[in-house]
Amino acid sequence: MNNYYALVMAGGSGTRFWPLSRKRLPKQFLSIDGRSESLIKMTHNRLKKTFDTKNIFFVANPEYSSLISREITDIPAANIILEPVPKNTAPAIGLSAAIISGKDEEAVIAVLPSDHYIKDEALFSNVLKAAYQAAREGDIITIGITPDRPETGFGYIRKGALISNIDGIDIHGVEAFIEKPNRQKAIEYLSTGRYLWNAGIFVFTAKKILEEMGRLMPQTLDAILRVRDIIGKEPGKAKEIFSSIESISIDYGIMEKVSGIRVIPADLKWSDVGSWGAVRDILQKDNYGNVNIGGNILIDCQDCVVRSENRTVAVIGMNSVAVIATDDAILVTPLEKCQDVKKVVDELDRTGKKGLV
Amino acid sequence: MNNYYALVMAGGSGTRFWPLSRKRLPKQFLSIDGRSESLIKMTHNRLKKTFDTKNIFFVANPEYSSLISREITDIPAANIILEPVPKNTAPAIGLSAAIISGKDEEAVIAVLPSDHYIKDEALFSNVLKAAYQAAREGDIITIGITPDRPETGFGYIRKGALISNIDGIDIHGVEAFIEKPNRQKAIEYLSTGRYLWNAGIFVFTAKKILEEMGRLMPQTLDAILRVRDIIGKEPGKAKEIFSSIESISIDYGIMEKVSGIRVIPADLKWSDVGSWGAVRDILQKDNYGNVNIGGNILIDCQDCVVRSENRTVAVIGMNSVAVIATDDAILVTPLEKCQDVKKVVDELDRTGKKGLV
């Protein structure tokens, strides 16, 4: 698999893990348990089991370039592709595919998020290998996560008939990509067994994705190819051209409009690490279901996430609450409301405490 | 009222306000809202409206001597009486009465806590003046707070018949001192209108209290008089004698056993400032009933107490919770469980984090 490339999407921003994450330090660069490596470093280590290190690429906003180099020390500088301007995933993937295909016409590319958690790494590697085999034939392959709860926070993929089996891995047709459902629909999806979570993992040849891009968004492909030829040489020009591109996701721009996409259903023990509640799900818990990072004192607490740095937090009699203390800020919230941390960040912005954002 | 003395009980220890209060910095030395003076300083200021500054005495554990001097800058050193050994309130009051009576045989003494809050200071002053008049005749007067809720955390006084009225202030007999009741009894007490909270405020002549002490605890009085004569000169000896004294409260040792005690019922808008819940009751609240000390961000919160120093706390979607952040520790607890902070302090002791206690 000398021509198998990983393209890690490292451009995500956001403050869902405030006060731990900040605008300048988004989630992929954090160690969620305070001890292990950052999520992006864990992703890189996981991919090294399947890909040659020299075949692992990152694409990101230039702002995060030095954070990536700091985390991933064994990567050639040329493997960090910097978007001239952030334009969502379709242009980032198109540009990266054009660059990789310039080095290797036969490239097969697996596109993967940088900030997810996968427990079953052996299965993940097998699935990626099967996807490689299938993608070489010209198909676009996505990996669909077997759901274990009626989650309303993810998009879904409705799988079709079984098409083939490669080394024990089933490959199905895709009937539809589906937007985030409401609770009732999510329960229905879970009960039928036909729906999978869309984890944003796609495998295709560079040739195939550029072909589809040329068909579905010819102006974007044209701009991408022009940027590919001058990137790193004429930054002002590259930025100007990229600025003109439509900002659009790969799901909406390509995947939902292409026929013949295949899905590999996989129970990867996957998490999008999307909230403090998700952190609770994946980390080690005490006998009462609490995640305690930093040696805090929990008395009569259940199902809490308590994390501190350089100071002691004591929590008494709380259920399903997150208490997150950094050197300059502290968050206290029920886990089910932790998405409202966005309101805190807005308030900090509004009140001029931008240093905390 | 040249012979009217205030004796402020400043020896209280405790960690009910951990992480704000510590063993070396108990509640009376704290500013509860982070801006105003400490409770002991507020107490001193309140008393200066009724007593000559030179007539205000403090009695405390030697450990707190420098804290008192730091807070109360306009007090003669001789007005800080240091217990050779802590022996609860009866010996502390007995020793103080013996010392004050040595300076002024006609002394009338008002004994008062150092760590309570009184909003209606004008009424308080009038009540103290009436108590002085009544105590001069040889009665022991206590002030009973008009209850406004079925509180189970205080002792009660059952008032008897109206005995006199001095300058508009009613003075009643006392039928009984009553231990902290259960909830049902507390509701009953509130409904009858005959019960008052025992706030630990007593007014008597030095002569009267020493007489009663001689009658009810002659050995204690004997030891106290011997210590009075050598205190400040022979500290080792004073400590040795005081160590032999029975440790007992003024309520249990004297007040419950003396007949002819009088009570002045008074609606002083008083608080014992005994918990973070009590702090919420007395401090200024936002439109949702939250006390916010330190410019914290509260989103969808009700009836919370949030206090920080040098960092920002953000609280989302919590009701009736205390979040208290100091430089080295953070407490999160429902207000109704904040007495369990004792368990935190025990745990810190046990795990060797004594620096935080």
Image: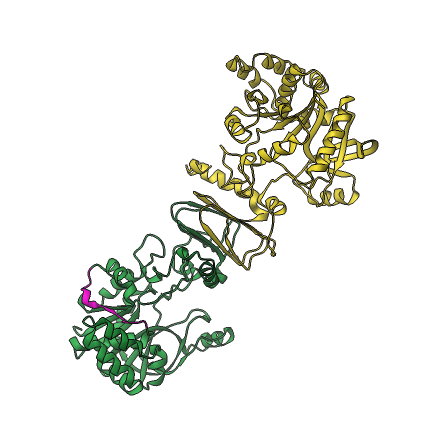
Chain colours: A green, B yellow
- Viewport quadrant of the N terminus of chain A: bottom left
As drawn, is B40 to the left or to the right of A236?
Answer: right
Q: Residue at x 51, y 75 (%)?
A: A184
Residue A90 position within the rendered picture, expressed as x and y whole percent measured from the top left: 31, 77
Which quadrant would residue B300 be assigned to in this image? bottom right
> Which of the pair B205/A158 is nearer the observer?
B205
Residue A356 position within the rendered picture, expressed as x and y whole percent measured from the top left: 41, 55
As drawn, is B143 to the left or to the right of A303?
Answer: right
Task: Say if residue A209 shows up in the picture.
Answer: no
Residue A125 among magenta residues:
no
> Which of the pair A188/B225 is nearer the observer?
B225
As drawn, is A216 to the left or to the right of B114?
Answer: left
Q: Note whether A124 is above or below B219 in the view shown.
A: below
Q: Residue at x 54, y 56 (%)?
A: B318
Which quadrant would residue A31 be assigned to in this image? bottom left
Residue A47 position within the rendered picture, expressed as x and y whole percent measured from the top left: 25, 66
Q: Note whether A274 is above or below B89 in the view shown.
A: below
Q: Which residues are magenta?
A: A74-86
Q: Note whether A187 is above or below A327 in the view shown.
A: below
Residue B190 position within the rendered picture, expressed as x and y whole percent measured from the top left: 75, 44
